[in-house]
Amino acid sequence: MTAYQPTPDFAASLDAQDPLRSFRDQFHLPPGPDGQPSSYLCGNSLGLQPKTARAAVEREFAAWEERGVEGHFHGTSPWMHYHEFLTKASARLVGARPVEVVVMNNLTTNLHLLLISFYRPTLTRYKVLMEGGAFPSDQYALESQVRLHGLAPEEAIVELLPRPGEYTLRTADIEARIAELGDSLATVIIGGVNYYTGQAFDMAAITKAGHAVGALVGFDLAHAAGNLALHLHDWDVDFACWCTYKYLNSGPGGTSGIYVHERFANRPDLPRLAGWWGHDPADRFQMKKGFRPMAGAAGWQLSNAQIFPMAIHRAALAVVEEAGGMAALRRKSEQLTAYLEFLLRRLQLPATTLEIITPADPAARGAQLSVLVHRNGRALFDYLAGQGIIADWREPNVIRLAPVPLYNSFRDVQRAGAAIEKWAAQAE
Ligand SMILES: *Cc1c(COP(=O)(O)O)cnc(C)c1O
């Protein structure tokens, strides 16, 4: 284990040893105030643009220009099959079988489509367990789903909260809560990585605990896809969805992916909202009555593929694959985050000034440290921006710093540490 040092030279030496260092050149890095590339530690909010993205979209513009409607059937990537071109890489990304994933729509839309199928409350089994302080869209989605079934959110939704004085949840407490809810629990839906604290949950353990009481278990992987090495199939997760514009660099408002475990692949009886793109392709164009879903996750599709966002996503996934997939990315990610943690801890700031609320255990976090700034947090955030360090601000007082392995360097992290040190010295 290297003894870390806070100097630019030391960071540069880590960069020199980094097998993924060349991938930085495959992205457009926004310039900071001095015109130099900023230290962009904000990939958890919006990932940077792969340089291949523009050409990927332009190829589809050209196909549209040259072929019009025939672009659906001809050319190197016929639009009718476009979503299929994303399936294999998406399956590898989340540790699933190809039949278990499909790319479609946007994240919150997909969360709803999955909950329609996998939150089926009965008179006695009607509760849904989620983490307290979940991303607001997930809270609203759950609340509205519960109401859709004529239930009251206060009665049906159970929120997991950390113990007093703690910021994150203990796996044992989650398991105990699930056991306690027992056969009143219909569904567990948790963010694989909490957007605010950066806590990565033990998805295998939570799934096992949920299944032990007969509940279905799903995850919103918005902050986990492209961040953690996921093994959804082996973990036996029932369903999941993710967006592609955070760690997957697929552009603002980009498309989304879903996972549905293979055991539901041939369950046309499962209630779902249907559309023609989920219908058996053999007679999709017969325009007949009677929905027959395709096998697997594909059977949850509604609409024909959104070619432009998917073209970006395809280019972005290719970069992930070229880098060696999530195992390679995660190795570097753990080092980047550990180095950032070292740089912050060595400042020995009192917890009343600055406190890391993300778990210290590398297995319980991804590429993010959330820093609670007790006084003048917004001022620190603005100071960092002035230094060309792009972080992410969450009300009321958290700065999220996310060094991501594809385009961040150890030098980026070192710059952030040095800027925080300077700010702390002048704030005293
Ligand atoms: C980013 C994020 C969203 C955003 O949802 P969209 O439908 O893509 O706008 C929802 N949930 C979580 C947990 C997120 O992190």
Image: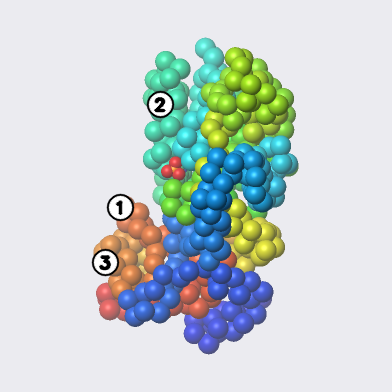
Residue 97 in percent (x, y) is at 73, 41
Mark 3 CB near ligand 1 (8 Å cut): no
- Residue tagged by mark 2? 144
Residue 94 vs 124, above or below: the answer is below
Residue at horizontal 26 percent and vertical 66 percent from the top: 379
Ligand 1 in which quarter: top left
- Measuring 27% from the left and 76% from the top, which residue is drawn there? 428
- The percent coordinates of residue 219 (x first, y second) are 56, 39
Residue occupying image coordinates x 55% and y 26%: 275
Disc 1 designates what residue? Answer: 396
Q: Are marks 3 and 1 in contact (CB under 8 Å)?
A: no
| Residue 95 tag number | none
Question: Count of labels shown?
Answer: 3
- Kindly report which numbered mark, 2 or 1, lies closer to the viewer in this rendering: 2
Identity, as a three-letter code, of the amino acid under mark 2: Ser
SS at badge 1: loop
What amino acid is found at the position of numbered circle 1 in the picture?
Pro
Check disc 3 and give the amino acid type: Ala
CA neighbours of label 3 inside 10 A, class few (<14), some (14 to 19), many (20+): few
> Regarding mark 2 in the picture, which secondary structure is present there?
helix
The label nearer to you, 2 versus 3, is 2
Q: Does 20 appear above or below 312? A: below
Quarter occupied by the N terminus: bottom right
User: In the image as oriented, which residue stretches furthest toward the front?
Assistant: 66
Who is closer to the viewer here, 395 or 87? 87
| Front-most of residues 180 and 309 | 309
Q: Is residue 292 visible?
A: yes
